Amino acid sequence: MGAGPLVNLDKLTYAGNRANLASVEGAAGYTFVEGDICDAALVARLLDEHRPRAHRRDIQRGRRKSADEYASRADAMRAAGRAGA
C-alpha cells in the first residue's frame, strides 16, 4: 500500500458505497472503519490504535505532524468526550 498503514474512516452516508473499496479491501496495511469523524471517542481510539504519521488534510497541505502532536490531539479529544462536547 505504499508509505505505510492506511486507516479509512467513512460514515458511508447516502453517497458512500463500500463496493468502491473492493480494490483495496484485504490489502496489507489497509483498515476500513465505518464511523463518524465527529465521534471523538472513536477517533481517539483509532489514533491510539494506529498512531498515524499524517492524515489526508496534512498531506494535502504538504505538512507532517509528529506522533506527539497526534497524541496531544487524541488526549484533547478524549477530554472533550468526557466533558460531553
Image (cartoon, rainbow, N blue to C red):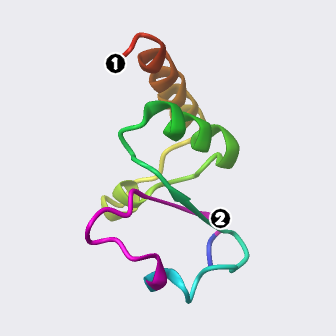
Q: Where is the N terminus found, in terms of image quarters? A: bottom right
Image quarter of residue 22? bottom right
For residue 5, which numbered disc appears in the image?
Answer: 2
Residue 17 in the figure: left or right of residue 49: left
Q: Nearer the viewer, residue 62 or 28?
A: 28
Q: Position of residue 33 (x, y in %)?
A: 55, 57
For residue 64, which numbered disc appears in the image?
Answer: none
Closer mark to the observer between disc 1 and disc 2: 1
Q: Amino acid at mark 2?
A: Pro
Q: Residue at x 56, y 89 (%)?
A: 23
Vertical comparison of 28 with 4: above or below: below
Q: Residue at x 41, y 18 (%)?
A: 80
The residue indicated by pointer 1 is 85
Question: Over which residues does the magenta segment extend?
Answer: 4-19
Vertical comparison of 42 with 7: above or below: above
Q: Nearer the viewer, residue 55 or 41?
A: 41
Q: Are marks 1 and 2 in contact (CB under 8 Å)?
A: no
Q: Residue at x 46, y 26 (%)?
A: 77
Q: Position of residue 78 (x, y in %)?
A: 51, 22
Q: How many labels were placed on the picture? A: 2
Vertical comparison of 78 with 69: above or below: above
Q: Position of residue 16 (x, y in %)?
A: 34, 71
Image quarter of residue 62? bottom left
Q: Position of residue 25 (x, y in %)?
A: 62, 79
Q: Nearer the viewer, residue 25 or 48?
A: 25
Q: Secondary structure at mark 2?
A: loop
Q: Secondary structure at mark 1?
A: loop
